[in-house]
Amino acid sequence: MKKLLGIFSFMYKIYFGMVYMLCGIVLYPYLLLALSGRNKYKRAVRVKKVWANAICFFTMMRVEILDKTHFPEKGPYIVCANHMSYLDIILMYKLIPIDFAFLAKAEVLKYPIINLFFKRRIDIYVHRGNRRKSAISIRKANEALENGRSLAIFPEGKIGWHPPKLERFKNGAFTLALNNSVPIVPVTFLNNYKLFSDPTDTLGSARPGVAKIIIHPPIMVTDASELVSLRNQTHQIIKEALENGY
């Protein structure tokens, strides 16, 4: 039975990849138009949402928000979420209602379609092994917040393949929040790993289903806020929700 489920998961991963690419190919001309010109950020948000919704529709992936909390009506703010699946990225495009930029490691440039958003400077990639390039990326992130754009960050800095364990958070998101006095919005992805596991795990879990997500109340940043306490508070909120969810 386990082997049969593994074969189904493998076939679903192939199907998911085909949908991902076909939706991207169909939307590619619109992406090129949307990601240029004066209003490219607003147009990019619309295209991102169309693309993410199309993928979820054809892969039979639904989203369920498990509480009544919503994102703030106005930005900017910084969304911090746990990272357990490549599905997290697609769902971020679907979830966040306003213009935002992903702040992600440079490896994201290897991902087809998504890398276009980074190459056209809609999203921001970080070269962690290069201090000068990392500093440039952080400057761009600060500029995005100053211009009213929100940010989405996975503060673990990588995909944690062993949920519900939550890796230690890096400081970047919280430094940005303090420097710009913007709130942190914690988000917990409860079961994305079960819906779409590491593609290199050939027979690992992958199936249609309902992505269960908690959008936590914003953590307000004040003059009295401290980096370590802000980081630890965000980590604890997500950790408790993740453990309770499992």
Image (cartoon, rainbow, N blue to C red):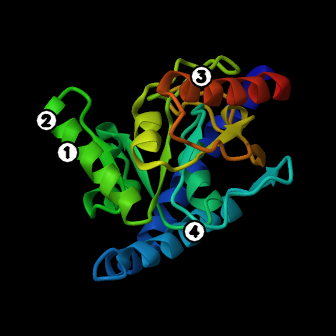
Q: Secondary structure at mark 4?
A: helix
The answer to which of 62 and 71 lies nearer the viewer is 71
Question: Of the residues shown, which amino acid type is indicated by label 4?
Answer: Lys
Q: Which residue is mark 3?
A: 232
Q: Could one spot residue 136 in this view of the protein?
A: yes
Q: Secondary structure at mark 3?
A: helix
The residue singled out by tag 4 in the image is 49
Relative side of 151 to 209, left or right: left
Could you tell me how far apart the alpha carbons at marks 2 and 3 are, in whole angstroms?
28 Å
Q: Which comes sooner in the sequence, label 3 or label 1?
A: 1
Whether label 1 touches label 2, CB < 8 Å: yes
Report the residue at 31% width, 57% height from top: 143
**Residue with the mark numbered 1:** 136
Pointers 4 and 1 in contact (C-beta within 8 Å) = no
Q: Tell me the kind of residue under disc 2.
A: Arg
Tell me residue 147's x, y (percent). 37, 66
Q: Position of residue 108 (x, y in %)?
A: 36, 43
